[in-house]
């Protein structure tokens, strides 16, 4: 079963911003190894989101209480309450009795990355354990979400993901289950994932390279400031200044991400038969009412986020909402028949 999910550009921005805060930077004993440990953890979690997914589902769950989503997905109030309780409220639902999760948690507790005796090797070990712990927890939550849906509701969910591709930077194979995939097509999607994983890794490295440059510039500007409160104040004041200075580099990374997203879409669309392709276009061009209203909600929230000072806003070369099916590919594909590898 595919559980690769999408994550928006704005979701990635949020993940990036949980790197170094002003308070963390202010700690004199936070050496380079600990700094690298934090980045390694966040980077691996970001990569996991991009390749396997989690956020798109938990973000969607927050909308399930809205009447138009409940009706569109044909969910009962009891289902919604169960999903929201088990996925959003519990820290690690149903994992408390899982032997592997219990063992992993116990092993993590043996490490204190901030103790004076910590070494670079123990920091790496802790980072690896933390990533494994988070992956298990995330995959468990996604599984709980799916397990609470009937087959018909799962189909509606997959159709919803197709219909809302305009809001999704990186599409995922699971949505195509609404198009009745063959086993051969599923195999091809697996191959695409394996093929593109190195490209995703390089893209994440680029994103973190810019983030590291931001933090390094901040440290240089406040190197003589010892008061923690003053550093926190300067963090707010200097963040916009440094972000503006690095905007060309950010735009280059975002443009690289757009190219990656385009290549991923083309490769996955190529797998579809003509019949599946026409069905996909219809869902995108004529989304059901609940998907249309969800798109409106997402764009409203995105506009509000973009209005906030200091946000990493996409430049003219980056992915934009509305690019569900690249027009160039749509025109090319619609002029051909018998093309897909999936037939």
Image: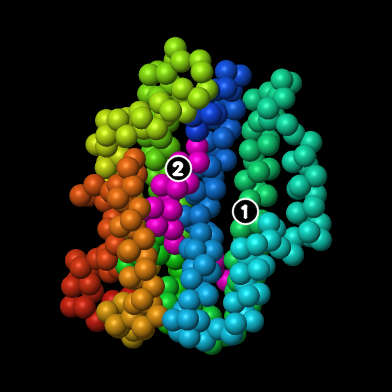
Tag shown at residue 252? none
Q: What residue lies at 68% left-to-right and 43% top-to-bottom?
A: 129
Report whether 189 appears left or right of 321: right
CA distance separating discs 2 and 1: 18 Å
- Quarter of the picture holding the N terminus: bottom right
The answer to whether marks 2 and 1 mark residues whose Cβ atoms lie closer than 8 Å is no
Q: What residue lies at 61% left-to-right and 69% top-to-bottom?
A: 84
203 versus 25 height, above or below? below
Report whether 170 appears left or right of 326: right
Picture coordinates of residue 250, whole percent (x, y):
30, 39
Picture coordinates of residue 314, whole percent (x, y):
28, 48
206 versus 3 height, above or below? above
Q: What residue lies at 50% left-to-right and 41% top-to-bottom?
A: 18
Q: Is residue 16 magenta?
A: yes
Locate residue 343: give its quadrant. bottom left
Kind of element beneath mark 1: helix
87 versus 163 height, above or below? above
Report whether 337 appears left or right of 210: left
Report whether 101 appears left or right of 88: right
Comparing marks 2 and 1, which lies closer to the viewer?
2
Picture coordinates of residue 19, whole percent (x, y):
50, 37
Q: Is residue 277 something one can see in this rendering?
A: no
Residue at mark 2: 16
Start and end of the magenta stretch?
Answer: 1-19
Residue at mark 1: 135
Residue in front for this viewpoint, 76 or 217: 76
Kind of element beneath mark 2: helix
Residue ranking furthest to the top:
224
Residue in front for this viewpoint, 270 or 248: 248
Picture coordinates of residue 304, whole percent (x, y):
33, 56
Q: Is residue 300 magenta?
A: no
């Amino acid at each position: 079963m595919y559980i690769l999910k999408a994550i928006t550009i704005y979701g990635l921005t949020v993940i990036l911003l949980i790197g170094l805060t002003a308070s963390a930077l202010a700690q004199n004993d936070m050496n380079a190894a600990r700094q690298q440990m934090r980045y390694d953890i966040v980077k691996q979690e970001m990569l996991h989101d991009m390749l396997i997914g989690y956020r798109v589902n938990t973000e969607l769950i927050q909308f399930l209480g809205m009447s138009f989503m409940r009706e569109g997905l044909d969910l009962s109030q009891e289902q919604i309450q169960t999903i929201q309780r088990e996925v959003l409220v519990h820290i690690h639902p149903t994992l408390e009795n899982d032997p592997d999760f219990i063992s992993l948690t116990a092993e993590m507790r043996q490490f204190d990355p901030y103790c004076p005796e910590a070494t670079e090797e123990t920091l790496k070990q802790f980072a690896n354990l933390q990533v494994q712990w988070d992956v298990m927890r995330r995959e468990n939550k996604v599984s709980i979400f799916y397990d609470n849906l009937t087959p018909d509701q799962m189909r509606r969910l997959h159709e919803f993901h197709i219909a809302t591709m305009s809001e999704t930077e990186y599409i995922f194979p699971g949505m195509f289950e609404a198009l009745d995939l063959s086993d051969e097509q599923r195999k091809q999607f697996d191959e695409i994932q394996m093929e593109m994983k190195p490209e995703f890794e390089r893209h994440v490295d680029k994103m973190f390279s810019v983030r590291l440059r931001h933090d390094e510039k901040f440290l240089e500007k406040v190197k003589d400031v010892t008061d923690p409160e003053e550093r926190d104040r300067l963090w707010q004041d200097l963040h916009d200044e440094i972000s503006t200075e690095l905007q060309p580099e950010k735009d280059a990374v975002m443009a690289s991400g757009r190219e990656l997203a385009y290549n991923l879409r083309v490769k996955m669309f190529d797998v579809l038969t003509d019949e599946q392709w026409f069905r996909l276009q219809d869902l995108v061009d004529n989304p059901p009412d609940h998907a249309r209203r969800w798109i409106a909600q997402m764009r409203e929230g995105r506009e509000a986020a973009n209005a906030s000072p200091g946000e990493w806003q996409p430049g003219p070369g980056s992915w934009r909402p509305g690019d569900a099916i690249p027009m160039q590919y749509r025109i090319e594909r619609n002029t051909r028949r018998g093309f897909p590898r999936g037939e």
